Amino acid sequence: MANIQEIFGSKVFNEEVWAQKLPKPVYKSLKMTIDEGQPISKEVANAVAHAMKEWAIEQGCTHYTHWFQPMTGITAEKHDSFINIGKDGKAILEFSGKELIKGEPDASSFPSGGIRATFEARGYTAWDPTSYAFAKDGTLYIPTAFCSYTGEVLDKKTPLLRSMERLSDEAVKVLHLLGKTDVKKVATTVGAEQEYFLVDKEQYEKRKDLIFAGRTLFGAKAPKGQELEDHYFGTIKPRIAKFMAEVDEELWKLGVFAKTKHNEVAPAQHELAPIFATANLAVDQNQLTMIILKQVAERHGLVCLLHEKPFAGINGSGKHNNWSISTNTGENLLSPGKKPYENVQFLLFLAAVLKAVDDYQDLLRLAVASAGNDHRLGANEAPPAIISAFIGAELGAVVESIINETDFVSEGRKTFELGAAVLPEFRKDTTDRNRTSPFAFTGNKFEFRMLGSALNIACPNIMLNTTVAESLAQFAAKLEGADDVIKAAKAIIKEELTAHQRIIFNGNNYAAEWVTEAESRGLLNMRTSPEAFVCYTADKNVALFEKHKIFTKEELAAREEILLENYNKSLNIEALTMLDMAKKDILPAVFSYIGKITKTTAAVKALGDNINVDTQLSLIETFSKLLACLSKKIDTLDAALVDAAQYEDDSKALANFYVSTIIPAMGELRAVADELEINTAAKYWPMPSYGDLLFRI
Ligand code: ADP
Ligand code: MG
């Protein structure tokens, strides 16, 4: 058993290590950079680089890498060794401040959405001193931001950092106006709960769809699914428990406060949640968590699936982005306190968030859009594609009384009676949970629940930070001119809550009636990702991002293009994989099986005309029909892919074609193949079944 306190952060170049390894003035200067955003001098950079190298070598590192988050959605790393040629021709180990601060990876092979031509290959990575460097697998990882030679942002980190600063500036402005002049900075805090599946590696290797697409593209339902609700919070099997223990240990060493682990709703599905951190750290740590989950799984003969919908018919995997804002003086701005009704500051920030969510529903929807997540949203396992906010009964009553100018009578926080004297009494939370809401207030934070499991959480947080910054900027402008600030704040609260009441929905988001009701409220419902992607360049959104200097119009267009391209490419891979599996594996397998039946039927018949072979013949007939159907569906999908080529130069049109034509064709091909699977003898079926994958670990 690991001694948590001993191993925690042991692979992180954190403040404790700085204090040990850095000369005092260097340490102070680095702290100033982080706390107050002061630039780093060459001398300081050199000293930090030297200390980093010494520490990394102690950790067994031979290489360093600028670790960045390009628009692929995953992280990128290029490893350089510390090695250099010394005066006498011998090897020496070096690492300069210049190498720490700036890297120059070839940017041409990362998605840029047309911002750069391939010949303009140069890109820069820039050290992000606010996220700690760490040692992993013999390499020193340095978190960095990534941009092009001409300065366009090519990553997810830079806009995130910008959005955090914007939110901080505007929140501080509002707090100062409310009289809290001691607040200097406001941080976005994020805790990302991560869901994932585990499958046996040997089984995985036998499924091309899992290998190429990360999800099963075929597969008849197993006799058992999640209907007994016996997996959620169920006893963790020993093999999985060992895996989870090792994941925890690795994450703790890397300074991630892995906190909660449990079995999820679907068989073979699990969840891991850390303690929240500042948004940019949380983003890095969530990326690291996904990497560690995958790495450790391999060591246990398992494969970790992070796809949003690895299996049809059972829940897919999501990620809950718990989000709040807190001051450098330690106050959570979304904490309602004992009397939310009288808490002007809280209500003002609540109004800012609700306004942001309503004004920019499209951006929140867009932030969670992907080909994979389209399988979840609105499928009664995840919130619908409609954005709304849950605030719970008590807060709901507060909001209503403000809007209607009626008295609010608090029921107070009820004490919970558990009915058995030995159990402790505890105070009930002011909000119940609403697992169906896309954006739920959970006591002192909002939980954005629409994210897919594979998503880099930077984008949703960029959206939340920027849009809330915009609300606050508008509020600050109004408060600035006011004689009586509190009175003005109350007026803003009433006005905004009234204007944005439609975004509040405390009911069941999975119900069909909500779709109709949301429509009558004028809320957006973008069912597919391509519909959402194109909102990046809507005029109001361009204006927002340019105002807050998060993205330029060109950068937004590039991001939209990257998302569309990624969507199209993912679906193309899926379609090609299906055709490959159908033609090379499924058809031949069924042919062998029919061949076998035909042969035995003939042999039986040869024994004498009086033996009845009707069963065999009807089986052969069933298979022949299904095969003809399969072959037709293969042809249809093949032809659709040929048709798609005409939209090669228009990613929007191509995405729409995938939605209208290719996805349905894939669905039809799958349906026939799954029917064949149900009827074919198991030993002939060319790949592990859902039952094998989900229940045999
Ligand atoms: P629940 O069980 O309701 O989902 P938890 O308290 O277990 O809530 O928290 C879930 C996640 O939310 C955890 O990762 C936790 O660290 C995070 N969290 C808690 N408080 C905050 C906060 N103020 N800001 C951001 N995340 C938070
Ligand atoms: Mg939760």
Image: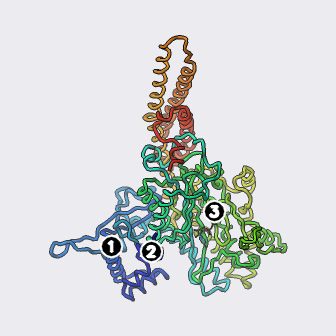
Q: Residue at x 30, y 75 (%)?
A: 95
Mark in front: 1 vs 2: 2
Q: Earlier in the sequence, mark 2 or mark 3?
A: 2
Disc 1 from disc 2: Cα separation? 24 Å
Residue at the far bottom: name it: 24
Mark carried by residue 360: 3
Which quarter holds ligand 1? bottom right
Residue at the far left: name it: 88
Disc 2 from disc 3: Cα separation? 38 Å
**x, y (%) of residue 614?**
57, 18
**x, y (%) of residue 151?**
42, 67
Disc 1 from disc 3: Cα separation? 40 Å
**x, y (%) of residue 624?**
52, 24
The CB of the residue at mark 1 lies under 8 Å from ligand 1: no
The answer to whether mark 1 and mark 2 are in CB contact below 8 A is no
Q: Amino acid at mark 3?
A: Tyr
Q: Disc 1 marks which residue?
A: 99
